[in-house]
Image (cartoon, rainbow, N blue to C red):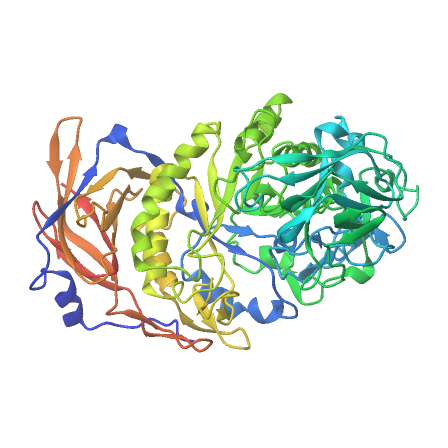
Amino acid sequence: MRWKERLVPAAALLGLLVLPPVGAARANTITVDATPAHAVNQFNPLRALGAGVDAVPAGTVDSIYTPANVTQQLTAGWGAVTYRLYTELSVQDWHWNPNGTWSGSGNGYWTGATVPASPIQDSFAYKLAHRGFTHDQGNDEGYSRLDDGDPTTYRKSNPYLSAAFTGESDALHPQWAMIDLGAARAVNAVRIVWSAPYATQYAVQYWTGDDPIYDAANGQWQTFPIGTVTNGAGGTVTLSLSPAPLSVRYVRILMSASSNTCDSHGSSDPRHCVGYAIAEVGVGRLSGSTFTDLVRHAADNTIQTVTYASSVDSWHQVADQVTDEEQPGLDLVFTSGLTQGLPATVPVAMAYGTPGDAAAEIAYLEAQHYPIARVELGEEADEQLMNPEDYGALYLQWATALHTVDPTLLLGGPVFAVEDPVFWPDTDNNTSWLNRFLNYLSAYGRLSDFAFFSLEHYPFDPCRISWRQLLGEPATITGLFQAWASEGLPASVPVYVTEYNVSYDYTSYEPALFGALWHADFLGSFLSAGGSGAFFYQYEALPLGRASRCSSWGTFSMFTADASYDITAETAQYFSTQLATQQWAEPVDAAHHVFPVASDVVDRSGNVLVTAYAVQRPDGQWALLLINKDRTRAHAVSVNFHNDADNSDHAFAGSITMVTLAAVNYLWHPRRANGFPSPDGPLMTTTVGGGPGVLYTLPHASIVVLRGVVS
């Protein structure tokens, strides 16, 4: 192991930290607004600063969760844990407990057992037999049944979005199937092979904008001139949509009334007899009685025409178990030592699960006396292309089931993948996903069931990162809080980023100093903007991975690991974590107060090069987190604490602790799958004097924490 303490020569420390180097920029000032009434936030580091665990390659749980690995992971200083749910990204149902019951005989809808047969060490996902997505955000190994070429299979919508479960008309939760032809094509007809239940009322539409997935706010779904059906009778239907072909790329079948006839699984379960099922769909041209289909039909997501669906029925069977990934068992996570006895944020499957199974999971955890901080309902609802009103309808059903188990549970979501997503315009031309979801809860008088707002934050495209992008993070975070407030998020609802890192895919910027600087800047700006908690992704150490779209290798972890999943080195984000959790914040279960800070270290365009974040700690010390994002130049700064209450200025007094991460003590060497850090820490700590006008040198591309008492 390489995590034992290492020493840095005192001469190196003094050369870096005490006096500005020759040629350094003029001295600048960091001004802390230390007025007691001006504190902008407070947080408890053990509960607000944590890390997340997630799915891992199949068969690796025992290798990853070793006592040695866990002990080393804890040295980073994280507090609470959040459990991520990769299964939702993959359009799969999660068997959080391998023991449980099927609604049918080895198939149907799964409910985990609430009584432990043995500690849960691992858990698995199950593919969905009635999926309508060609691709997904997970391992992308499934395919759509809408165009798989097999008329005996079918895509079916989520039964919990039908009137039988929502208590609302099906017309208020229309379900849809969308086909992407890949380019604009001449279209005047569709062919639908209905299964049961089928739609008795539906419309065939085309998108008027550029891209309904990635540019959802700019466009409308327009019904073809003769694309409305009000008396559908199922079977195979070839519909003429317009007198002359229209040039379209995206086609949608919008279904608003169901036959409520039972699917191939029979009438034994009411969930089999609601919603909409389509066996095959074709889009193309009709000339006389000849239909020319532009859709490629294949049980292969690399060949078939891309389709999307509003929802998926979670019916599955034993044979659908996923074998190439697994989720760490809930018992394992809570007993491994990672949670440190602190309440954890846990998920329940919602997009592809059942409220009964969600309730069983929470009942199990509480029977084991595991402390629960919050419960997230689903994961990345926006990435699943869920209509916000559909998510709201599911949310209320799940909230009712969960609060029946425990009325005190704090429930939240939607775990946005995009921080402020938009959705197709509704009848009021409202495209705000968040606002429409909140409106739905409010309409039912159930906004009190929404105890927290959660999202993910991955700001950079892994293949298009530049150093200059570091400069924009604080403004991005501030802008998000302003946007959420304008969309109706109540000020009383806390905001949690339950998963974050540099990018949503691997990149060499993650383990490099860039990753550490961004990390510190994000934490400081998020807490300063009013955030309640942030959870780093990811806690587990895995070997370096390659980005899916470019030749960039990195890791989401704070560590590198070998093929046996033993930790081999710390990355820069390990040290930025230590700076935030053990130097800037005091590692205690107590409130820290955040105060505004201004910096006049700017470039010629007015971009702030040195950002700073101030906290007053329970031990009475002030701590300042300073990030020098200037890649080439050191900056000398003085620090002034101004109190508006009596218009007085103050400075650090006596001996000040200065802790630094810079190129002199950490450097990442990208070598594809064999990248490594050298030097690899430790953090450099020295003692410097305080006083008015004292200059503190911030090395180029560095993070510095100044900590001490203020006069």
Left or right: residue 6 compared with residue 137: left
Closer to us: 107 or 593: 107
In the rendered image, which quarter contains the N terminus?
bottom left
Q: Position of residue 391 (x, y in %)?
A: 64, 37
- Percent position (x, y) of residue 38? 27, 30
Classify residue 425 as left or right of residue 616: right
Relative to 695, residue 36 above or below: above
* Identity of the residue furthest to the right in this view: 267
Examine the rendering and report whether any part of residue 591 can be seen.
no
Q: Is residue 539 left or right of residue 332?
A: left
Q: Residue at x 79, y 54 (%)?
A: 129
* Spot occupied by residue 569 in the image (x, y as percentages of width and height): 41, 72
Which residue sits at x=48%, y=27%? Answer: 490
Total numbered labels placed on residues in the image = 0
**Where 465 sits versus 88, above or below?**
below
Comparing 501 with 624, the one in front is 501
- Locate residue 127: give its quadrant: bottom right
> Considering depth in this image, is 67 or 523 the residue closer to the camera?
523
- The vertical placement of 386 against 426, above or below, is below
Determine the residue positioned at 12% across, 39% down: 650
Residue 19, horizontal then vertical, whole percent: 9, 60
The answer to whether one can see residue 619 in this image is yes
Position of 178 relative to 665 (above/below): above
- Point out the image quarter for the C terminus: top left
